[in-house]
Image: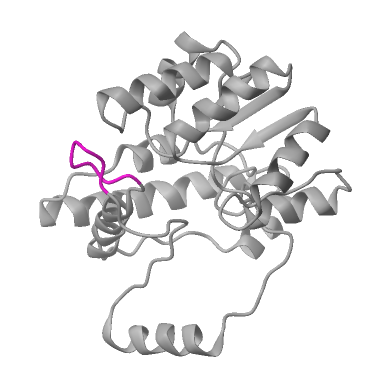
Amino acid sequence: MKRLIENLHSRDFPFRFCDLGKDRLISVLRALIMHRVIHIHVSNPAYQLIFAAFCRLTFKTLLITYHGKWGRYDPLNNAIVKLSAHLAHAAIVQDRESLQQALRLNPRSQQISTYICGGKIERLTATLDHEINERCKHYAATFCTNAWDVVFDKNGKETYGISELIERFTDIQSINYSYPIPPVTTVRTLSKTCRTFPATHFLSVVYMISGASFLFQMHSSGTRPPMVFLCLSMKHRHLEYPFWHPRP
């Protein structure tokens, strides 16, 4: 929410922000009456339905962002969520599975990521900076996620996928193989000087040798080679390559 507000300010987008936990009810009602488009971020299904009914009766355009997976409540609250999505102008969800269900109730439903790029980089507090430095002394890796806590849904599945991220990064770190990649300067020099014998031919040889060495190491250790590596190494035919031209 903080980053959303910062981005709206940076674009000179006129809006009024209300905090349902702090603002008085009369000021919230006044804001609802004065504005034509309403966007709510509340996890309580009852509040969602109240806003949806009010905006439908007063001809307001209501956008509801639903946090978490669709159908994460008990049957009664799930029914309330469906009704509010049907009454709202548009429903916003965070994953494809939820989008498929939301589209059945509201054809204007959209999937939008929860991540919003920050407008500025703030320095860590001294306490947090000290805590991270202390962790680095005792742990091999420290992960930062865009989640407030480790949360599980009613089916026992983790909502934010933090454990899965840690497992995948651990798997990557356990593969301790050397894979030589030509430096960027070498590639650019070859591309300028080697006109009759293209630099890509030289790179193909380098990748064939290094790739064979990489696969031999994995075969010796009994590790299954990743398909991503095979596809990338086989399709390397030109210099415009993600290794030295990172995508945004």
**Residue 95 visible (yes or no):** yes
Which of the two residues, 29 or 75, is positioned nearer the viewer here? 29
Residue drawn at point x = 62 percent, y = 48 percent: 199
Q: In this rendering, is residue 138 above or below 233?
A: below
Segment colored magenta? 152-159
Q: Quadrant of residue 56?
A: top right
Q: Is residue 230 left or right of residue 28?
A: left
Q: Main secondary structure of the magenta part?
A: loop
Q: Is residue 169 left or right of residue 34?
A: left
Residue 33 position in % (x across, y down): 78, 32
- Decide whether residue 155 is among the magenta residues: yes
Residue 147 position in % (x across, y down): 43, 56
- Decide whether residue 97 is among the magenta residues: no
Colour pattern: one colour
Q: In this rendering, is residue 76 above or below 42?
A: above
Which of the two residues, 149 or 225, is positioned nearer the viewer here? 149
Residue 162 position in % (x across, y down): 32, 54
Residue drawn at point x = 38 percent, y = 24 percent: 97
Q: What is the residue that sits farthest to the front in this orientation? A: 26
**Residue 111 visible (yes or no):** no
Which of the two residues, 58 or 184, is positioned nearer the viewer here? 58
Q: What is the residue that sits farthest to the right in this orientation? A: 12
Q: How many marks?
A: 0
Q: In this rendering, is residue 107 above or below 247?
A: above
Residue drawn at point x = 45 percent, y = 40 percent: 43
Q: Is residue 74 left or right of residue 42?
A: left
Q: Quadrant of residue 230?
A: top left
Residue 70 position in % (x across, y down): 37, 28
